[in-house]
Image: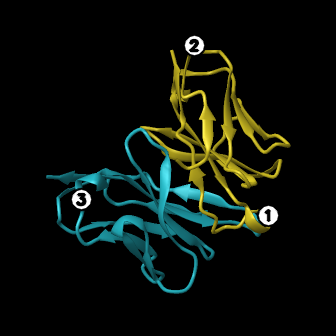
Chain colours: A yellow, B cyan
């Protein structure tokens, strides 16, 4: 158990809909990362937050957005869903020492499996 | 821009045999390198990482990796694998401006240990 929790575990929805994925980081971790894992594209970094502020952006679509709240939990919002958004979405957290240390170990949650029908 | 190449998508190996999973990276700046493992239906877990110092890094579960700067490689090795090592292994590289951590993961290598 990494200490990172993600809800829900599974989500089934229809095209065009909007969903919210939730992540609670390990106690004391200030950085949160979101990843998308699919069979065709592998593990893709989406976005990173540190102590409530966006720190780095990866291959995140404009239809997707995220935020980190004062209690450090994070939410990933996916809107206007398409079939191709079906994937496993992981959240990870790290201590974020000194404002986001490059060498931080990331601790991954169990993931949310999103199926868009 | 940084990138990671895992040369083998699948590696079958017999139990108690040695294994090497290959990883090459490209980056214009200094990097940190990681190997993560993903067991079926689970999230990723850190096996080992190279930040600085000795180029031979030892990790959990008997795995080790060697950083070779001239060949831009970070291959993962284990002298004797067990059935429980069956999993997917991801190489990752981290770089970025000060204070940011942007990690690029490889496509993954599926290790199948055959009894």
CA distance for labels 3 and 2: 42 Å
At numbered mark 1, what does the secondary structure look like: helix, strand or loop? helix
x then y, percent, for residue A6: 61, 36
Question: Chain under label 1?
Answer: A
Q: Residue at x 50, y 40 (%)?
A: A37
Q: Residue at x 45, y 42 (%)?
A: B42
Residue under numbered circle 2? A14
Q: Is residue B100 above or below residue A63?
A: below
Q: Is residue A32 above or below residue B54?
A: above
Where is the N terminus of chain B found, in terms of image quarters?
Answer: bottom right
x then y, percent, for residue A84: 52, 27
Residue B10 in view:
no
Residue under numbered circle 1? A99
Residue under numbered circle 3? B82
Q: Which mark is residue A75?
A: none
Question: Chain under label 2?
Answer: A
Mark toward the viewer: 3 or 1: 3
Number of residues whose C-alpha sits closer than 10 Å to that of mark 3, classed few (under 14), some (14–19) or many (20 or more): some
- Residue found at the very far bottom of the displayed protein: B54
């Amino acid at each position: 158990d990494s200490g990172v929790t993600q809800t829900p575990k599974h989500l089934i929805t229809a095209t065009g809909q909007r969903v919210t994925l939730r992540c609670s980081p390990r106690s004391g971790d200030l950085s949160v990362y979101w990843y998308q894992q699919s069979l065709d594209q592998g593990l893709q970094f989406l976005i990173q937050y540190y102590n409530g502020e966006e720190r780095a952006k990866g291959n995140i679509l404009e239809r997707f957005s995220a935020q980190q709240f004062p209690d450090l939990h994070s939410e990933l919002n996916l809107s206007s869903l398409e079939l191709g958004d079906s994937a496993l979405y992981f959240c990870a957290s790290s201590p974020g020492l000194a404002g986001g240390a490059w060498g931080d170990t990331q601790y991954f949650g169990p993931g949310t499996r999103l199926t868009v029908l | 821009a940084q990138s990671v190449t895992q040369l083998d998508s699948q590696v079958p190996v017999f139990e108690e045999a040695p294994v090497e999973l290959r990883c090459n990276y490209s980056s214009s700046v200094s990097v940190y390198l990681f190997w993560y493992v993903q067991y079926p239906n689970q999230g990723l877990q850190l096996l080992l990482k190279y930040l600085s110092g000795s180029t031979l890094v030892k990790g959990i579960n008997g795995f080790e990796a060697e950083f070779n700067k001239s060949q831009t490689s970070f291959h993962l090795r284990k002298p004797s694998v067990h059935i429980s090592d069956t999993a997917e292994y991801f190489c990752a590289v981290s770089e970025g401006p000060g204070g940011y951590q942007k990690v690029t993961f490889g496509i993954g290598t599926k290790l199948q240990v055959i009894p």
